[in-house]
Amino acid sequence: MKTPAAHLLRGRAAEARAAAHLQAHGLSIVARNYRVAGGEIDLIARHGAELVFVEVRSRRSAAFGSAAETVTAAKRRRIQLAAQQYLQGLPQRTLPPCRFDIVSITGPGDAAPLQWLQNAFTLD
């Protein structure tokens, strides 16, 4: 069995850390790594009545900017596409209020600072 690449392991660890952080702050995770053609959402959570689509980014160093700064306009569009498809699959007639958050982890190791940016962006 092939061992996953180091960057994939870091990504999984960052997502697990982000999920634990969000849960500690009252969110419940309803989906992980939701994928559709053309887009992906790392975490989907409920925060009260609100549905939260979360992009998790990590970087070992801030030398070229924070992890949050790597969420480009193209990446936001792919997240929004996936969110729209997720919402279309819900059985409800009335859509819940939604927001897009970013969890950014910048620095080496498990002690790297975690920053949770709520309402980081809106639908374009």
Image: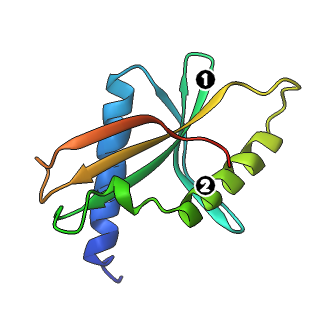
Q: Residue at the location (31% across, 33% down)? A: 21
Q: Which mark is residue 79?
A: 2
Rendering quarter of residue 122: top right
Labels 1 and 2: the sequence-earlier one: 1
Seen in the picture, residue 119 relative to 54 is either above or below; the reply is: above
User: What residue is drawn where x is 69% and y is 68%?
Assistant: 38
Where residue 64 appears, as percent x and y from the top left, is 23, 68
The foreground one among 9 and 120 is 120
Q: Position of residue 28 (x, y in %)?
A: 49, 27
Q: Is residue 71 visible?
A: yes
Q: Image height check: is 74 above or below 104?
A: below
Question: Which residue is situated farthest in the right direction here?
Answer: 93
- In the picture as drawn, the residue positioned furthest to the top comes out as 48
Determine whether the residue tagged by mark 1 lies in a helix, strand or loop: strand
Q: Which residue is mark 1?
A: 50
Give the quadrant of residue 48. top right
